[in-house]
Amino acid sequence: MGINLIKRYELKRTLGVRSLFLTSVYVNDKLCDMSRPLRIEFDGAIYHVTSRGDAREPIFITDTDHILFLDILKKTCERFNWLCYAYCLMDNHYHLVIETPDGNLSKGMRQLNGVYTQSFNKRHQRVGHVFQGRYKAILIEKESYLLQVSRYVVLNPVRAKIVESPDEWKWSSYRGTAGIEKPHAVLTIDWILRQFDKRREKAQKNYKEFVKSGIGRESVWEGVRGQSLLGREGFVKKLIYCVKGQEEIKEIPRQQRFIGRPCLETLFNKKSATNIQKRNVKIVESVEKYSYSQKEVADYLGLHYSTISRLIKRNQF
């Protein structure tokens, strides 16, 4: 049974979308002894979703597999009322940018990966898992990061050095959004293009330039909090309370349980950095209260791991 932390609760002025109700926060359908990613789901939430092949094996072998997956994705979007802003199908994994007006990512992903697994195995006369564990999903703020994340998605083949230009990869949303070919029926392009110009032709030209300018840039994921949230500070703060009280649930990965913890830069300010006694207090606090690993603290402070370990042991007696 999923963990429902908060009953339907209106979130005003959080994401700038029309429907703002927190439906639930999921660890998974049930608790077990393996680590499970945290799921924050609410009406209007937008995610970057990835899923990889089991043991890094290919999940797309032929062109028919790509076509089949996009067809299943289209049917999933229709059934669960999703909007797909971007996609990229690589050999052994895929990327999606999905909006969920009804706050139902987990349900839709079970449908998408489950149906594709059955179809893939039947076509290739295989049995067993196609995907490696559960999918990964990062909740993103629409206004500040949707464009950047969508660009990141379509540039995957370029970063992997499979192609030199995104228009050379036929299994992404780039060609459809840029007007090079008719968009796949699963794709929603109006919102993205409106960010560049009201006129379609001009918008597509500007979109191409925007994507091209992203080649070689630093990763958009530098600002991700707890492997779960990507947005401006206000967006993150309004959602951090969703996971408060979950620090003791070991099935949730540590970085996600402590998503609201202060960063090491905040804990070790100038005063604590220059005062050894205050610094040592903050070291203990970082490890025992905020669950930073001893290695993380040691690396940040430029100290040997054994120094941190001795301080922690000393504090326990």
Image (tube, rainbow, N blue to C red):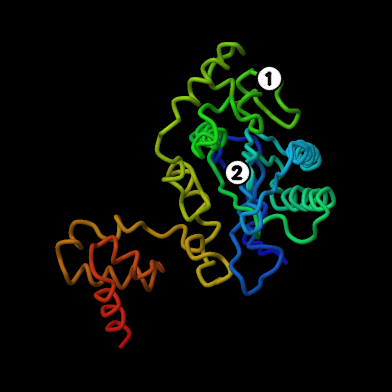
Give the position of the N terminus as an image quadrant. bottom right
Q: Is residue 4 left or right of residue 73?
A: left
Q: Quadrant of residue 142?
A: top right
Q: Which residue is mark 2?
A: 47
Give the position of the C terminus as an image quadrant. bottom left
Residue occupying image coordinates x 63% and y 62%:
27
Residue 315 lies, in percent from the top left, at 29, 82
Whether residue 116 is situated above or below residue 286 in the rendered picture = above
Residue 182 lies, in percent from the top left, at 71, 20
- Amino acid at pointer 1: Glu
SS of the residue under disc 1? loop
Q: Nearer the viewer, mark 2 or mark 1?
A: 1
Q: Which residue is mark 1?
A: 181
Residue occupying the far bottom of the picture: 317
Number of on-image labels:
2
Q: For the residue carrying disc 1, how many other residues have a C-alpha within 10 Å: few (<14), some (14-19), or many (20+)? A: few
Whether residue 188 is situated above or below residue 308 in the rendered picture = above
Q: Is tag 2's residue or tag 1's residue first in the polypeptide sequence?
A: 2
SS of the residue under disc 2? strand
- Amino acid at pointer 2: Tyr
Q: Is residue 126 left or right of residue 5?
A: right
23 or 138: which is nearer to us?
138
Residue occupying image coordinates x 65% and y 23%:
190
Residue 48 lies, in percent from the top left, at 58, 43
174 or 195: which is nearer to us?
174
Whether residue 151 is situated above or below residue 236 in the rendered picture = above
Q: For the residue carrying disc 2, how many other residues have a C-alpha within 10 Å: few (<14), some (14-19), or many (20+)? A: many
The mark found on residue 112 in the picture is none
Residue occupying image coordinates x 32% and y 59%:
264
The residues tagged by marks 2 and 1 sit, at their Cα atoms, a distance apart of 25 Å
Q: Is residue 7 left or right of residue 185?
A: left
